[in-house]
Image (spheres, rainbow, N blue to C red):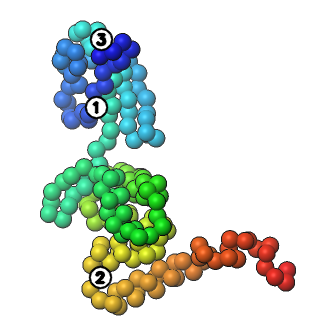
């Protein structure tokens, strides 16, 4: 380790399992300083080992688990959300930054529920809203798979619902919306 570098122990404390010193493996350490990082999603703690006296940093994050239909539990992944939505956005004018922002909104929505485990169905529901705002075609693609559309009528109903929701918002290619109110003739 170079001069000025500090070891970082990354992990989550489980129950009463002690946080071990990375230098001497002693199980007792004292917290010297705590700070929130990543907009409150993690806590960084400076610790001092009571045995060897050396200091180290730990990073603690809340684990958000997704329970799949099969009962298998896996850790929530923004990357997995992005990969799923990217397939629905294939060929659409949606950039990676927009997908990352959508995944962040989905995670924030899920975490705001305040539960440690969430059914995979709820993750899908959390994706639908932001995706509908991002791109209507990608939304229809994702919803058709997620909700298992089986007929043309399923698509027609969803398209009608989407049109109703978008009726109040100007279309992105509407020249009047781009120019603003003051450019209307006769005013």
Determine the CA span between mark 1 and mark 3: 17 Å
Query: Within the image, what quadrant is residue 2 found in?
Result: top left
> Looking at the picture, does residue 121 appear above or below residue 152?
above
Answer with left or right where residue 42 lies relative to residue 180. Answer: left
Characterize the local packing of mark 3: few (<14), some (14-19) or many (20 or more) Cα atoms within 10 angstroms. some
Q: Secondary structure at mark 2?
A: loop
Residue at point 68%, 71% (across, down): 178
- Dot 1, how many residues are within 10 Å of its Cα: few (below 14), some (14-19), or many (20+)? few
Answer yes or no: is residue 28 visible: no
**Mark before the other along the chain sequence, 1 or 3:** 1
Q: Is residue 8 above or below residue 137?
A: above
- Say which residue appears at 28% left-offset and 66% top-offset: 121
Residue occupied by mark 2: 149
Numbered tag placed on residue 140 in the rendering: none
120 left or right of 160 in image: left
Q: Residue at x 26, y 11 (%)?
A: 50
Point 43% across, 39% down: residue: 38
First in sequence, mark 3 or 2: give its number.
3
Identify which residue, 135 or 45, lies in the foreground: 135
x and y, in percent, of residue 179 in the image: 72, 71
Which x, y percent locates residue 1? 29, 16
- The numbered disc on residue 10 is 1
Kindly report the distance in space between the C-alpha atoms of the residues bearing marks 3 and 2.
60 Å
């Amino acid at each position: 380790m170079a001069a000025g570098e500090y070891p970082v122990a990354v992990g989550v404390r489980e129950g009463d399992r002690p946080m071990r010193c990375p230098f001497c493996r002693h199980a007792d350490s004292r917290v010297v300083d705590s700070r929130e990082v990543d907009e409150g999603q993690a806590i960084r703690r400076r610790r001092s080992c009571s045995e060897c006296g050396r200091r180290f940093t730990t990073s603690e994050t809340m684990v958000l688990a997704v329970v799949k239909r099969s009962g298998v539990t896996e850790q929530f992944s923004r990357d997995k959300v992005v990969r799923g939505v990217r397939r629905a956005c294939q060929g659409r004018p949606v950039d990676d930054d927009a997908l990352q922002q959508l995944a962040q909104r989905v995670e924030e929505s899920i975490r705001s529920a305040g539960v440690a485990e969430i059914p995979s169905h709820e993750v899908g529901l959390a994706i639908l809203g932001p995706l509908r705002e991002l791109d209507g075609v990608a939304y229809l693609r994702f919803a058709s798979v997620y909700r298992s559309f089986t007929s043309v009528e399923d698509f027609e109903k969803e398209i009608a619902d989407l049109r109703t929701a978008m009726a109040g918002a100007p279309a992105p290619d509407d020249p009047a919306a781009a120019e603003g109110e003051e450019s209307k003739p006769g005013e």
